[in-house]
Image (tube, rainbow, N blue to C red):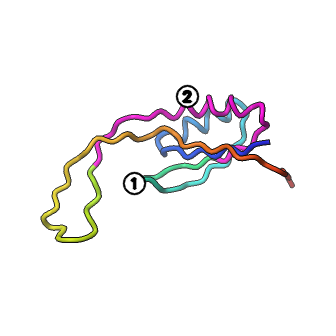
């Protein structure tokens, strides 16, 4: 048995949740925040049999695509913020960060 931990951007969350349910994967969704943009993420916890891990990874890959987005950089922590003029920069957002962990025991009460 494996635990698949997938951190995805909030924009991809509903699409991934629907795809996992359609393919009969059970998942727990957790709200999370992180990354250098400090934007909202959703962390999915998916417990599955070893043989179904490739299928789960395919579903995640198909529903969580990376894309380019214009963002305003965060102001610097030191110095005079009045003279700081943020220029939008293009960054890659989306996609998924996935960890696959071995599970020694599983209990359902």
* Residue 62 within the magenta-colored segment of the rendering: yes
Residue 26: horizontal and vertical position, in percent? 72, 41
Q: Could you tell me which secondary element the residue under label 2 belongs to?
A: helix
Q: Which residues are magenta?
A: 45-71
Residue at the image position 20 percent from the left and 71 percent from the top: 79
Tell me the quadrant of the picture where the C terminus can be found. Answer: bottom right
Looking at the image, the residue that sits furthest to the left is 83
Residue 52: horizontal and vertical position, in percent? 74, 31
Residue 19: horizontal and vertical position, in percent? 62, 32
Label ID, residue 62: 2
**103 on left or right of 81:** right
Tell me the quadrant of the picture where the N terminus can be found. Answer: top right
Q: Which of the 4 quarters of the picture holds residue 27?
A: top right
* Label 2 neighbour load within 10 Å: few <14, some 14-19, many 20+: few
Q: Give the residue number, with chain letter if any, for mark 1.
A: 36
Looking at the image, the residue that sits furthest to the bottom is 79
Name the front one of labels 2 and 1: 1
Q: Are marks 2 and 1 in contact (CB under 8 Å)?
A: no
User: Tag 1 or tag 2, which sits nearer the N-term?
Assistant: 1
Residue 81: horizontal and vertical position, in percent? 19, 67
Please name whichever residue, 23 or 77, is drawn nearer the observer in this view of the structure: 77
Q: Could you tell me which secondary element the residue under label 1 belongs to?
A: loop
Residue at the image position 82 percent from the left and 50 percent from the top: 104
Please name whichever residue, 69 or 10, is drawn nearer the observer in this view of the structure: 69
């Amino acid at each position: 048995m494996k635990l698949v931990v997938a951190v995805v951007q909030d924009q991809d969350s509903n699409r991934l949740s629907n795809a996992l349910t359609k393919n009969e994967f059970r998942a727990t969704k957790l709200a999370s925040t992180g990354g250098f943009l400090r934007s909202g993420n959703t962390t999915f916890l998916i417990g599955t049999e070893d043989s179904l891990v490739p299928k789960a990874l395919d579903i995640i890959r198909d529903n969580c695509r990376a894309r380019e987005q214009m963002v305003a950089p965060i102001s610097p922590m030191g110095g005079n913020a009045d003279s700081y003029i943020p220029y939008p920069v293009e960054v890659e957002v989306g996609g998924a960060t996935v960890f696959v962990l071995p599970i020694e025991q599983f209990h359902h009460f």
